[in-house]
Image (cartoon, helix red, strand yellow):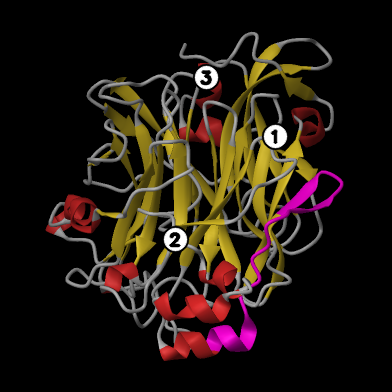
Amino acid sequence: MKNSIPLSQMLMRNNFCRRIKGLRVTPVQLAFVLLVGFPIGTTAQTTDKEVVVFDNVHSEVPYRIPALAYTRDGRLIAVCDYRISKSDIGINNRNGLWQINEVMRMSTDNGRTWGAVKTVAEGNELADDWHAAFGDPCIVADRESDQILMGCVAGKIGYWGENRSTRGRRQDCVFFRSNDGGHTWGPGELRTDDIWNLYEGTLPGGQSAHGLFLTSGKIMQSRYVKAGSHYRLYIAHPVRLDSFDKRMGTFVIYSDDFGKTWRVLGGTAAPASIAQDESKVEELPDGSVLLSCRDKDGGRRFNVYTYTDPKTAAGTWGEEVMPSNMTRDSINAVNGGIMVVSARQTSTGRPICLLLQSVPQSPERRTMGFYYKVVTNRTDYATPSRLAAGWVKGLKITDATACYSTMVLMDDGYIGLLYEKNSHNDGYDIVFQRLSLDEITGNQYHYDDTQPCRPT
């Protein structure tokens, strides 16, 4: 769609009075704007290696839900919610507004500096319901082209709560595309029925989904499996039945045409996890699919999908496991990042694969940090129980309040972590930090891709 000027930037210009006539706002919105303002900055604030990409502490409108992509030419694209509604999508909060925008910033120097804020998807209170709000982004940059895909939920219906979705009242699913590396974006593509219908009468016992939530942060693209026009994409998401106590769990959908069509990985006969909350997906060295789930009752659950035929996506899920040091008593159940990185043991020079999980290292929403696991052969992740063993607590980044996180591996060998920090006014600062594997593992391991993790 045509890049629209965010309401915040328009109001801060000297010719505000001349331009306000064309804005798509209600009288309630306008009163809210004039009262509180919309302070979106265009320069990042830095302290040491930390960069505040979206400054929530000084904004009356909260930022939440970070998503991060790394393009084939080495540019970072950070996206998050700009919550004019001051709430999760589908909850008409105290200011009487539904609107949530998706905003982005781009970095061309591996996160040291960031460009101006742009609006990717602008909610519109006056349009059809699904245009009112766009929230909880997930994003991927194609490894072979300049195409970028961003998914989000949309509209005026929530996943939980009194205004929750039902079988006949669906929360919308929308995708936005860029064909030039994120500089411009096309109009939203409504995919609600395409995805919901995957679970229409196909769940155990012939049941149907009453809630479906495209989860935030990351669309994972395979490094190895290309069965269509593009390397395979994966999104993990929860599915809810008609009441909270009849919970279903988490499924993974995949696409071989860069998000135009989707199928359920492993089918709908049983969920990959009972976690039923925000989750992320990563690819293991043999091409198997690792699912890392936030459990709504606390802790973290892992499962592994092992292919028998990657081209047709045939295979099976294992039996999910919660690591002993990632229970509700050890970590906070939030949407964390998961990654596989090629590395080398510093003391011996032995090449390994390293699994990284970013998550608060306490039961509260604070102390953002890492857990890591060493993988030397397929036996270390052949089953979920083996994969769940041997996780080590790594670097703690901060003692401050912290919540969701996502990460990418950059061309310079550093991990780019985008996470929520400093809870304030129903949101968080969205902070970027460059970190080496040496730092994350206490100098036990360092990045080395001379023998990269590959299918075995």
In the rendered structure, find residue 109 and report the number of the disc placed on it.
Answer: 1
Q: Which residue is mark 3?
A: 379
Q: Is residue 45 magenta?
A: yes
Please give left or right for residue 240 compared with residue 92 in the image. left
Quadrant location of residue 230? top left
The label number, if any, that marks residue 137 in the structure image: none
Answer whether residue 219 is visible to the viewer in this image: yes
Residue sitting at 31 percent across and 37 percent down? Answer: 254
Nearer the camera: disc 3 or disc 2: 2
Tell whether position 263 is magenta: no
Question: Is mark 3 in CB contact (under 8 Å) with mark 1?
Answer: no
Structural crowding at the residue carrying mark 2, measured as other residues with C-alpha within 10 Å and reported as few (<14), some (14–19) or many (≥20):
few
| Among the two numbered marks 1 and 2 on one chain, the one whose residue lies closer to the N terminus | 2
Tell which circle, 3 or 2, labels the residue nearer the N-terminal end: 2
Q: Nearer the viewer, residue 131 or 357?
A: 131
Q: Position of residue 96 (x, y in %)?
A: 45, 88
**Mark found first going from the N terminus, 3 or 1:** 1
**Marks 2 and 1: in contact by CB < 8 Å?**
no
Cα distance in 3D space between marks 1 and 2: 26 Å
Residue type of the residue flagged with mark 1? Asp
Task: Tell me: 431 left or right of 125.
Answer: right
Between marks 1 and 2 in the image, the one whose residue lies nearer the viewer: 2
Q: Residue at x 37, y 38 (%)?
A: 234
| Range of magenta residues | 32-52
Q: Residue lying farthest right?
A: 48
- Image coordinates of residue 21 in percent, x first then y, are 43, 80
Report helix, strand or loop for mark 3.
helix
Tell me, for residue 4, which label it has, or none.
2
Q: Residue at x 45, y 39 (%)?
A: 140
Cα–Cα gap, marks 3 and 2: 51 Å
Task: Name the amino acid type tagged 3.
Answer: Thr
Residue 335 visible here: no
